[in-house]
Image (tube, rainbow, N blue to C red):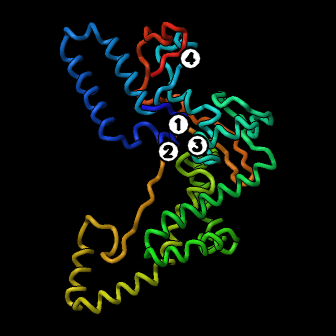
Amino acid sequence: MPALRFKTCRLLPGNVRNRELSLIQRRILRRLRNKRRSIKRNLSQRENLNSNIKSQTTRKLSLYYGDLPIREMHRGRERTSYIPFLLNQETRSDVIPVRLRFSDTLPQARQPISHRRVCLNNGLVTITHLKVSHGDLISFKENDARTRGEEIRRSFYIDISVGKIIGKFLPVRIWRRTKTEWFRLLTTQRGCRLLLKSGQELRSYMQEEDLERTKKFGSAKVCLGSSFAEHNRMKRNLFHFKYFFLLKRRKEEEENRKRAISPFVYKSSLSLYRNSTYCSGSPFTRKIRIKRIELPTHYSEVNHRTLKAVVSYGPNIGHIPHDIRLKDPNLPLRSGNGRGQNI
């Protein structure tokens, strides 16, 4: 698997347990699980358990992170029996901007850091692998914050809504004609109001979410990856927009079907559908759910207008999935040439 620096941010949207693996990766993990079970059953194979754990850990971590060196992780080897590999990667200065949705990919997050445009606690940052501590303030320069804020709002409010949702329900010819018009419309305040139905309803809905989040987490901080800032709220309110946008088209389809189908068959199909327990909507209108990304280990206060965020890790930040812990304290962390071992 190539190094992660040449990959897009497809490894970051969720936890390791939740991400979808390819067929080859599933086959590797299935063989590893079967091998571990056979080792536990056979007493003769328990002597080579440490070497098996080493090979399993190496292959598992390469599935999710690629060929990454672990030079600095040998420091915590003497104090703990495992290495928090996932935790160390999530606190990097180039990973957190992707989590905050300030950037879409890791190369996009590393470019402004190398160009001295990202500030950590009001100081310039030039190291991409710098560890961000609890309570640190991440921000951009004033000149870059305005342009990048417009790009972020454009990608959230326009690319996601117009490109991924509205385009699926329109014919190709109509979609090509109206695409440029939607891009122009949604850059204005009127287009945003049309997208979110009304500003008052959006404010009340956001206040209700803040109260629920405060009751659940005990603070007004935002859960990164699940319901943070304006992004996920906009996605939820897109259901209202999609309903009004497609209401006229659905009515026309229902009228055409009523004309084509006899009234007796139409009523019987509705009654059968209502008595069914496997469906959640009418047979002529489908409710499409947007997948929700869950990452309960990170919390942060995000402002996508000024591009500032106060990073704070939640109470579950120390919880690491059991499958990716390096449990062998005798695991060699350095190769013979002195460089970090790639896993």
Q: Name the image quarter holding residue 45.
A: top left
Mark 2 in CB contact with mark 3 (< 8 angstroms): no
In the image, what residue type sits under mark 1? Phe
Task: Say whether marks 3 and 4 touch (CB < 8 Å).
Answer: no
Query: How far apart are labels 2 and 3 at the CA level?
Result: 8 Å
Name the amino acid type tagged 4. Arg
Q: Quadrant of the C terminus?
A: top left
Q: Is residue 157 left or right of residue 319?
A: right
Which type of secondary structure does the marked residue at label 3 adopt?
A: helix
To which residue does mark 1 refer?
Answer: 6
**Which of the two discs, 2 and 3, labels the residue nearer the N terminus?**
2
Viewer-nearest of discs 1 and 4: 1
Q: Which mark is residue 13?
A: 2
Camera-near label (3 vs 4) is: 4
Binning the other alpha carbons within 10 Å of mark 3 as few (below 14), some (14 to 19) or many (20 upward) gives: many
- Residue 111 vs residue 153, the one in the foreground: 111
Q: Which residue is mark 4?
A: 71
Would you place residue 111 above or below residue 172 in this image? above
* SS class, disc 4: loop
Q: Which comes before the other along the chain, label 3 or label 4?
A: 4
